[in-house]
Image: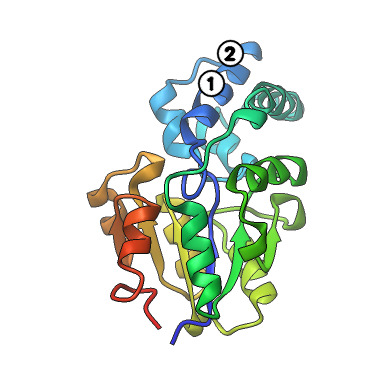
Amino acid sequence: MIDAVLFDVDGTLVDTNYLHAATWWQAFLQHGHTVPMADVHRAVGMGSDKLLDQLLPGDRDRDADDGIRTAHTALYAQYWSRLQAFDGAADLLRACSGRGNRVVLASSAAAPELKALRAALDADDAIDEATSGSEVEATKPAPDLVQLALERAAVPADRAVFVGDTRWDVEAARRAGMPCVCVLTGGWSRAELEEAGAAAVYDDPRALLDDLDRGPLAL
């Protein structure tokens, strides 16, 4: 029995992963770091604390990290008014809510960015709660954000499912004690997500919606 569905937002419900890859890449260049964009893309989905450690040398001047984050935020903010939700994303949230599931967004985004993501989704009527990366000490793949979303859903882990798009979502959900259903819209392959431990993998939110009564989110 599923009582709550927790959703990652970036790359899962809203088409942002490649925007993040491009703007992180540019922010790194501004601060003297050349990082292949393919590597940046593979780290998207982590919070910025983990992403910088994943991509930059360990002996770097960490005093510059805040400047890199600020540069990324400024570059990415230029797209906020043009963000697009994936086909079926809002309908999926409303379908889950309509059958009595608690719907919680588990986003690593800071509060202002999350506001822009929710505006792109245009489904606040179906969202019960939301988290932001500003509220936890460690972001994905640490389980803190997913655990906070679970607390706000007010259900036990064995009655919830997490929906994401990256290996980092799968790891965070597993460490929080729940399965992760993935979509391919973040740019990770089906094989990669299945190898990471995804309970099921769908092409996109519309495909998950179409399988809602038969797949892993079925009541």
Q: What residue is shown with label 2?
A: 29
Name the residue type under label 2: Leu
- Residue 173 image point, x, y percent: 48, 66
Judged left or right of residue 34, residue 212 is left
Q: Is 215 situated above or below 197?
A: below
Query: Total number of numbered labels?
Result: 2
Compare residues 88 and 28 and report the one nearer the observer.
88
Judged left or right of residue 94, residue 131 is right
- Residue 16 image point, x, y percent: 52, 36
Q: Are marks 1 and 2 in contact (CB under 8 Å)?
A: yes
**Residue at the limit of the structure toward the bottom, as seen here:** 1
Judged left or right of residue 154, residue 135 is right
Quarter occupied by residue 117: top right
Residue 127: tell me if it is visible. Answer: yes
Q: Please, what secondary structure does the residue beneath circle 1 have?
A: helix
Image quadrant for the C terminus? bottom left
Q: Write the residue at 69% across / 27% down.
A: 77
Q: Write the residue at 38% across / 43% down.
A: 185
Residue 144: tell me if it is visible. Answer: no
Q: Write the residue at 57% across / 63% down.
A: 143
Judged left or right of residue 69, residue 183 is left
Name the residue type under label 1: Trp
Q: What residue is shown with label 1?
A: 25
Q: Is 181 situated above or below 2?
A: above
Q: Is 81 situated above or below 170?
A: above
